[in-house]
Amino acid sequence: MFGRFLTIVLFALGSSASSRAEIIDRIAVTVGSNVITESMILSEIQLSAFQDGREPDLSPAAKRQAAERLVDRMLLVQEMDEARYPVPPMADILEQIAQFRKSRFPTEDAFRQELARRGIDENELREFFQLQTRALQFIEVRFRTGVQVSSEEVASYFNQEIKPKLLAQNQAVPSLEDLAVDIERILVNQRVDQAMEDWLKQTRSLARIRFREEVFR
């Protein structure tokens, strides 16, 4: 929102007839012939929380949101694979992770300790970053290419959105020329987001998606 999601989280159920645990992983969502398991949802929650620097939310609502993201990513992966869009080199991903570690943790030991505390495997983290990078690069090519914004649209956004808000806050209003580049970037991003949303809506309507509601209670 997408191979990192294949990490298996095992669930042990006690049995009255035996002291041994039974290992299961419930199917949470089917997307055509593909499946999203409960462990994949939990992995998505853990990895996203780690990346954002927060504790994971394992509530039913959070699990449902994570499942929705996985559905969207699964559909995007299918689109990338059909287009034969390349996978980013692992060397680039390792550099990203190194920069992430330096920005969040004082030492490599602290980084690894936090991974261990959260139960995240380093290979899983690499796949998470690699798929995320591939998806972002694909979205740039698929939905941003060719998006243009006119000078009239920039001026309209300035006069209708930026200027009134600044005046209401008794702040100085910069010139349109000073803000033109930033406004153009905002408008382009809005159009890319809308194009992506429209594509997902259409693609999801054509896919056979079934949520197993018992998993999200």
Image: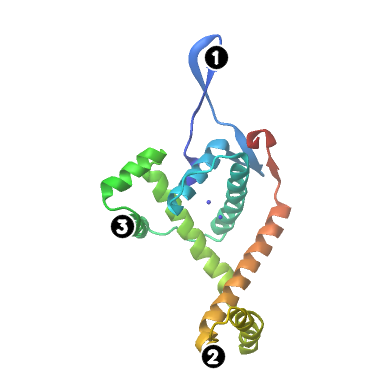
Residue picked out by circle 1? 15
In the rendering, at what x and y percent does residue 177 appear?
Answer: 53, 90
- Cα gap from disc 3 to disc 2, whole angstroms: 38 Å
Residue reaching furthest to the top: 17
In the rendering, at what x and y percent does residue 43 appear?
Answer: 49, 42
Query: Dot 2, how many residues are within 10 Å of its Cα: few (below 14), some (14-19), or many (20+)?
Result: few
| Quadrant where the C terminus is found in the figure | top right
Foreground mark, 1 or 3, reads 3
Residue picked out by circle 3? 102
Residue picked out by circle 2? 175
Say what secondary structure mark 1 lies in: strand
Q: Type of residue at label 3?
A: Lys
Across the whole image, how many numbered discs are drawn on residues? Answer: 3
Query: Can you tell which quarter of the image residue 197 is in?
Result: bottom right
User: Residue 33, can we see it?
Assistant: no
Q: Is residue 48 left or right of residue 117?
A: right
| Point 53% across, 37% down: residue | 39
Q: Is residue 93 above or below residue 193?
A: above
Foreground mark, 2 or 1, reads 2
Say what secondary structure mark 3 lies in: helix
Q: Is residue 55 left or right of residue 70?
A: left
